[in-house]
Amino acid sequence: QVQLVESGGGEVQAGGSLRLSCTHSGSTSSNEDIIWYRADPEQLRVWVARIYSNNRPIYAAAVKGRFTISRDPSKNIVYLQMNDLKPEDTNVYYCNTPANVQQDIWGQGTRVTVSA
């Protein structure tokens, strides 16, 4: 089972930037398939960005062009660079692997607050 710890959240004004970090351990690969999520209004977690093991990124429509996912395999960290933040980006952000999601295993997340 891969363990993941999210960090880097905070408060920022609209238009500002934050970089979230997802530190993972317990994997045989430094290139884990990692997904960033946040909760929808019904508190269901929805994906916002994903980086595949081959480093190909994909983004949800709501964040495309503003968020960038990347990794530093030497540190087992996946980053989520969030630019041009909007109040509607306010949320708790989680990172996870597909296997953990299937088993409903989640970390604490990191809170992002964007003020107007």
Image: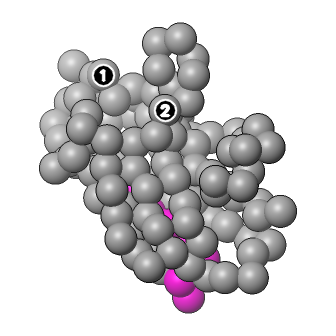
Which picture quadrant has residue 62? top left
Q: Which mark is residue 88?
A: 1
Give the Cα distance between marks 2 and 1.
14 Å
89 is higher (above) or lower (below) than 6: above
Q: Which mark is residue 30?
A: none
What's drawn in magenta, residue-wise? 73-81
Identify the amino acid type marked 1.
Glu
14 is higher (above) or lower (below) than 66: above
58 is higher (above) or lower (below) than 31: above
Return the x and y of residue 30 as percentages of the image width and height: 61, 82
Residue identifier under label 2: 46
Residue 48 as seen in the image, left or right of residue 77: left
Q: Secondary structure at mark 1?
A: helix
**Who is closer to the viewer here, 84 or 34?**
34
User: Does the segment drawn in magenta span residue 19?
Assistant: no
Q: Residue at x 75, y 82 (%)?
A: 28
Q: Residue at x 21, y 46 (%)?
A: 64
Query: Farthest residue toward the bottom?
Result: 74
Return the x and y of residue 22 as percentages of the image width and height: 57, 60
- Asked whether disc 2 touches disc 1, contact meaning CB atoms under 8 Å apart, the reply is no
Asked if one can make out residue 111 in the rendered structure from this viewpoint, the answer is yes
Identify the amino acid type marked 2.
Val
> Which of marks 1 and 2 precedes in the sequence?
2
29 is higher (above) or lower (below) than 97: below
**Who is closer to the viewer here, 116 or 57?**
57
Residue 68 as seen in the image, left or right of residue 107: left
Colouring rule applied to residues: one colour
Asked if one can make out residue 81 in the rendered structure from this viewpoint, the answer is no
Return the x and y of residue 29 as percentages of the image width and height: 66, 82
Q: Residue at x 76, y 64 (%)?
A: 2
